[in-house]
Image: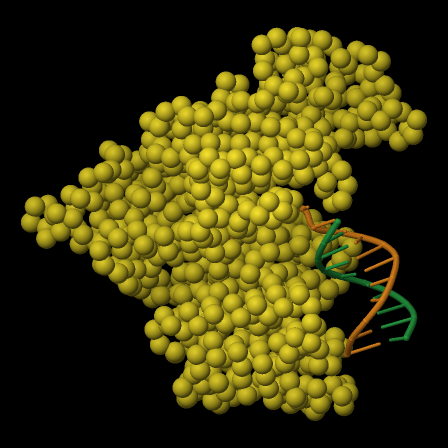
Chain colours: A yellow, B orange, C green
Amino acid sequence: MPENPHAEHLQELLEDLNEPQREAVTHGEGPLLILAGAGSGKTRVLAHRIAFLIYTDQAQAGEILAITFTNKAASEMRERVERLLGRATRGMWLMTFHAACARILRAEAQRLGYTRQFTIYDQADSRRLTKRSADAVGVDPKRYTPAAIQNQISAAKNLLRDAAEYRQAAASPFEEMVADVYDVYERDLHRMNAMDFDDLLFRTVNVLELFEDVRERYASAFAHVLVDEYQDTNHAQYRLLQLLVGGGRQEPARGRRTSLPGHRNLAVVGDDAQSIYSFRGADVRNILEFQDDFPDARVVKLEQNYRSTETILSAANAVIANNRGGIAKRLWSELGQGEQIQLRTLEDEHAEARFVVGEIERLVDEGASRAEIAVLYRTNAMSRVIEDTLVRREIAYQVIGGTKFYERAEVKDAIAYLSLIANPFDVVSFTRVANSPRRGIGQTSLARIISHAEALGESVWQVAAEPELIPGLGAAAIKALRRFMDTMQELRSMTGVLGDPERGEQAAAPRAAAAPIADLLEAVLSHTGYVEALEAERTIEAQGRIENLQQLVEVGREFDAIADDDEGALDVFLQQIALVADADTRSDEEGLVTLMTVHNAKGLEYPIVFIAGCEEGVFPHSRALDEGALEEERRLFYVGLTRAMRQVYLSSARRRAVFGAQAYGMRSRFVEEIPFDLLEEPQERVFRAGALGAGLARTGFSNGVRAGVAAGGSWSGGSPPGRRGSETQPAQSSFRLGEDVIHAAFGDGVVTGVEPGGVIVVRFADDGSERKLMAEYAPVVRRA
DNA sequence: ATCCTGATTTTTTTT
DNA sequence: AAATCAGGAT
């Protein structure tokens, strides 16, 4: 393209890319599948491709929709693109699926009977509403937890099944019950002018499917669509993309052709080996079947890894090889062998934490920066012990995930005030806020207000503003409510909204100058007496809460500074912060050690990575020991390993407190799947039967030594009676769920079931088969 | 309406 | 071990 005015830039853009990367970046129109192994530079490829499309005039900034997994990834991508282009990327839709949907819905949701001010309920809000709906339907909360019901509803929404369709497919009493709750839940959500996270996707799909003009508008607006982490998209997201770019698979089940016309300029990047969100509805098939959806797709594989040493990659490759299926790739690197992977088994989680922290101190002494170190774990609860130890040794750290800033009670309260001001139908926020701080509006009064609002079909706000009309409300409650609502009206007037807070009327109502968000927040916190009540507590905890609220005001101030206009600023602010994940608050500048779950680490890289809790029952998690879930756990472990650039530490504890009780777990099978010579473990704790495996440096859990134990035949010694329930039997006779065992013929396996009559179910690692065994007679022993 | 207490549950993973 | 919840006493 010599006549291209950007020729110079173009050449520079393509200069330092490898061949497949360049192929992906310069691909023209039509579908493109980039299979990008860990650390193969996929973010770079995406950023370069965006820049390429613009330099070659294949798209204007405003015609690009680029989807990332987190807001953080989106802003990093934006930065990179801006650096490549040398100018701002205004108008480019570079955000998460949820953020893009919220933006589309703000413009289009009126067609579905919502206002622009619709509230986004996070998972906790949604759970509360699920519980309310379940109560209303008369579900026995002892039998079914709201969480289980919520999961069902969420899964249904991810599959784009509404309540009616769900009911039709219901095949069990449980599902019938969920269908009832789903009905009520949906009705209430809509009444409250609110959406949950899943709705953002679902309702966007609805709008695009129901209104062809809307679909055409967005489909042609986004000339090129790019999606990162495509392996973690769910069906709703799949359908959304299909609606925007056309193409897609046939769904004969629905009896109609669902493949759509469109420009099909869709570039997706992903790695099936890193698919770790199936619990959230993600469907790996989306990436595996991309070529079925688009038979003419260009496929590019990125297999050169620029991140990790060969040792780390060999370990990761070996682990993932235990999964069946998947797209064959073999990561390689030119970074040399590097250090061996360090392996440690400690007494308990405290000893493990001391080891991790002690090693961090040593590394820092040797010149490493704290920011180069990440400690990963399977569940958020595991951060606590490590944090305690870090605090004691005065090492600066940050925790990503866990209790998030926006999930703290005081922050949610403050936001709920704003939500109610923006959306007078928001019952969940009203409930949250009406008696916080205490002002004498209790549960009973609250229930009366809400049911009256439901009976009249009016907003809670409207009904609460006229307390004397609410049947059954006592004089004290009327007075308290009037006081409360006077304050709220006053605050509401600060948003510049005049006229009645009625649905529909709002948008058309004349606006006075709206106060900045930060000012509004400060007014909320002082006029409602919220901060005052906290101050009165005079505790350190309350002081911390006040500080959190001040931080929230700062967030508001930052928003005010960059908000384009104040038209609907409050709505935008609320809908934006509803979608902020904790992963987005990660800081990479300061000298902080980073602690987070492996899930949260996806897409990140650190020179030094610790993976703590490498134990059966922890990682893989005990609730994920069946076949499909186990493979996902393995992929998760793979993700953990491949975060590391030059050094990996794997640690496990023999004993760990879980729910207050001590649990014993064997070392994770994933560790065992790493080839022997890539690992290093100090020799002080050589297995007792070490004589059998002379020269085997590792402890008794290595492949070699394990075989030695089996050959030694330690189960022969008086196999104890395996009858369950017999009090007199020796403790080691009954097998427990999740325990690792060794069978003389089938090798090692894990107990996946304990049945009456001394029968245990064991899944064997060798062939993945599951067998029922008589614990008493079968040649099985617990792996020591 | 609010506070207290004992029972029960929680820990996968998150936009 | 910690947090949440239901039920009952105040």
Task: From the viewer's perspective, tell me whether residue A699 is left or right of residue A739.
Answer: left
Q: Is residue A244 above or below residue A663?
A: below
Using the image as rendered, state which of residue A722 and residue A286 is in the foreground: A722
Name the residue rendered at 69%, 35% in the picture.
A348
Task: From the viewer's perspective, tell me whether residue A566 is left or right of residue A354.
Answer: left
Q: Position of residue A149 (x, y in %)?
A: 66, 55
Name the residue rendered at 24%, 33% in the picture.
A19
Q: Position of residue A50 (x, y in %)?
A: 27, 50
Task: From the viewer's perspective, tell me whether residue A44 is left or right of residue A116.
Answer: left
Q: Position of residue A137 (x, y in %)?
A: 72, 64
Answer yes or no: is residue A192 visible.
Answer: no
Q: Which picture quadrant has residue A167?
A: bottom right
Using the image as rendered, state which of residue A28 and residue A398 is in the foreground: A398
Task: From the viewer's perspective, tell me whether residue A617 is left or right of residue A247.
Answer: right
Q: Is residue A759 above or below residue A235?
A: above
Q: Quadrant of the N terminus of chain A?
A: top left
Q: Which picture quadrant has residue A746?
A: top right
Name the residue rendered at 17%, 44% in the picture.
A12
Name the residue rendered at 77%, 14% in the picture.
A715
